[in-house]
Amino acid sequence: MKNQIPWNILMKQLGNKDTKSDPLFNEWIQEKENRQFWEELQVIYSVNGNIPEYYEPDHRKGWNNIEQRMIRSVRHRGRVLYLLRIAASVLLFMLGATGYWLVDHHDQKAIYSEVVSPYGHKTMVLLPDSSVVWLNGSSRVRYKTDFSKERVVELEGEALFEVQKRPGNLFSVTSGLLRLEVYGTKFNFRSFCGEKEPEIALISGSVGIYNGNHHLKTMKPGEVVVYSPIKNKLLTTDSNLEQITSWQSGELIINNMPLTEVFGYLERWYGVDIAFTGRVNTGQKLSFKVKTESLRELLSIIDRITPVEYTIDGQHVKISNAKN
């Protein structure tokens, strides 16, 4: 009976402490995994103050749930410092330094966790082996909750990894065509779907880069490389590590970047959608730093560097050439 949750009974028990225990509930909670699930459910209820809706163990339905909830809650920045691990079933809950969603997917083979950091947020994730992942806005990671045999992480977006060294237990990160083998390391990995060339910046340690089983390169600290899918090769760049990783410490450094790339960073930084209208010189390169400036203040600064006009409508921004 441990995988059959008497949801209506649980809701009565959760919402009314004076309710007498149901015989079915007493039988169900005898299982160790069910007791753990019940304790975690009580914590979630004490944090949110709401009774969770019933959640079917279906991956597609669960992900749709996340997206709908995230749309309604993307502006809410809670600081909930609980990391709950679900063993008996699948449960949706919110966690993070600035707010993000985590969901466990249970199937017959493994339990996975997926963490999403929405636009305008930076999110810290503590992995089962105590490795730390900082997620930039519009990014997500997915990983098995059991790291005892293998440590495999899937990334979409941008993340700064601080990986614990575990001899005999390889840590790998996959994103798109690339797979990184990590050997106790700190590095930044940017691989957004809309960007053609993923970027890896190695701060310390060692990283092996693979396309499938084909070894492309073993990086050294201080190196920054981008991957060209067309040529299936890595290109070393002269990008600055401080600039690349500055987003994690609350500062955005733009150094000689073309306008299109600049506004891509600003979208993730401020949590907005930016569109160009008319003939904008998108190839022009800019350099500046962002700390506490609002989006409107920053656009005014950009306007002094390269004349542009802009309109802000909620989370939608339009950029056009300034009229003479």
Image (spheres, helix red, strand yellow):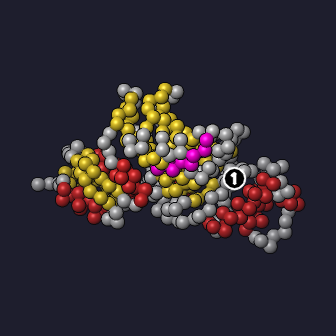
SS for callout 1 = loop
Say which amino acid is labelled 1.
Ile
User: Does residue 321 appear to the left or right of 13 in the view shown?
Assistant: left
**Furthest residue in direction bottom, as rendered:** 18
Is residue 86 highlighted in magenta? Answer: no
Q: Quadrant of residue 151?
A: top right
Residue toward you, 241 or 233 = 241
Seen in the picture, residue 289 relative to 210 is either above or below; the reply is below
- Residue at image position (48%, 44%) is 205
Residue 113 in percent (x, y) is at 61, 48
Residue 166 in percent (x, y) is at 60, 44
- Residue at image position (46%, 57%) is 122
Is residue 165 highlighted in magenta? Answer: yes
User: Does residue 102 appear to the left or right of 156 in the view shown?
Assistant: right
Look at mark 1 in the image and give the residue it sits on: 86
The 10 Å Cα crowd at callout 1, few under 14, some 14 to 19, many 20 or more, is: many
User: Does residue 44 appear to the left or right of 153 in the view shown?
Assistant: right
**Furthest residue in direction left, as rendered:** 324
Seen in the picture, residue 320 relative to 42 is either above or below; the reply is above
Residue toward you, 281 or 178 = 178
Seen in the picture, residue 262 relative to 290 is either above or below; the reply is above
- Residue at image position (14%, 54%) is 323
| Numbered range of the magenta stretch | 160-167
- Residue at image position (72%, 39%) is 108
- Give the prevailing secondary structure in the magenta stretch: loop
Q: Is residue 180 visible?
A: yes
Count of numbered badges drawn on the protein: 1
Residue 161 in percent (x, y) is at 49, 49
